[in-house]
Image: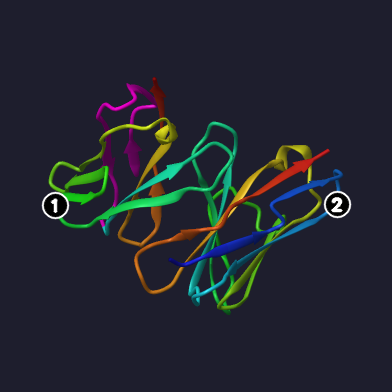
């Protein structure tokens, strides 16, 4: 099956710094990538949808200047959390899809902001 | 608005059968997905239904009734490793996935 990787798997950063999370589709070309956030004991919350070569579409309530998304190629999307604060601590998950119906999820990145 | 409803938590016994229900009201319908998510891990795909009826895949089956806005995930011969959250998601007319809050399934010996 299709494989999606994320890096890093865990990151701890200080308040006010920025963190970049990479999402790669390893064996297929992802026309669309999705970024989700999941707080403990809650369901996935879609943050944004990105199509290769175009600007990401952000969900209501998600600050696009704080969560920068770049989808520069068909196999790589990055999420940068700028000026991170403790309330940004969460589990960030990306998923990717090609022309098939299924979304393939990355393993997730646990961000802790101290 | 769009809404996906599923029970918050269910408990079942090892070796038994459990059915997790999901009802939805969405703007359009382009398929329903079930995902399994173990604590601290990303979701993994279980099933996809776009037509009415039952899809069977090993110990797991998923059923869809589009006219009723209803689906269920059936897990047979439960194993302890099946303890996880089960997420129901519907793809709407914009091909956006709308997620349910998930059902936490607890398996007891």
* Coloring scheme used: rainbow
Depicted A85 relative to depicted B108: above or below: below
Closest to the observer, B40 or B67: B40
Is residue B101 visible to us here? no
Q: Which residue is mark 2?
A: A17
Closest to the observer, A83 or B107: B107
Q: Residue at point 32% right, 34% down?
A: B5
Position of residue B53 in the picture relative to residue B39 (left or right): left
**Neighbourhood count class around disc 1 (C-alpha, 10 Å): few under 14, some 14–19, many 20 upward:** few
Q: Secondary structure at mark 1?
A: loop
The stretch of residues the image draws in magenta is: B1-29
* Rendered location of residue A53, percent (x, y): 58, 79
* Chain identity of mark 2: A
Position of residue A101 in the picture relative to residue A81 (left or right): left
Depicted B15 relative to depicted A61: above or below: above
Q: Secondary structure at mark 2?
A: loop
* Rendered location of residue B69, percent (x, y): 20, 43
């Amino acid at each position: 099956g299709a494989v999606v990787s994320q890096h890093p798997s865990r990151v701890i950063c200080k308040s006010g710094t920025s963190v970049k999370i990479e999402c790669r589709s390893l064996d297929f070309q992802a026309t669309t990538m999705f970024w989700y956030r999941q707080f403990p004991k809650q369901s996935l919350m879609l943050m944004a949808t990105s199509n290769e070569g175009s600007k990401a579409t952000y969900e209501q309530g998600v600050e696009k200047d704080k969560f920068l998304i770049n989808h520069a190629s068909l196999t790589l999307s990055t999420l940068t959390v700028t000026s991170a604060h403790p309330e940004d601590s969460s589990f960030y998950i990306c998923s990717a899809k090609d022309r098939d119906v299924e979304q393939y999820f990355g393993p997730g990145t646990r961000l802790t902001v101290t | 608005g769009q809404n996906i409803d599923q029970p918050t938590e269910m408990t079942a016994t090892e070796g038994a059968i459990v059915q997790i229900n999901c009802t939805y009201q969405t703007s359009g319908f382009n398929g329903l997905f079930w995902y399994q998510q173990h604590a601290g891990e990303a979701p993994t795909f279980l099933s996809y239904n776009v037509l009415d009826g039952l899809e069977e895949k090993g110990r797991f089956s998923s059923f869809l009734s589009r006219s009723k806005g209803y689906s269920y995930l059936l897990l047979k011969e439960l194993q302890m490793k099946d303890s996880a959250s089960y997420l129901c998601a519907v793809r709407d007319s914009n091909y956006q996935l709308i997620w349910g809050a998930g059902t936490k399934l607890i398996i007891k010996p």
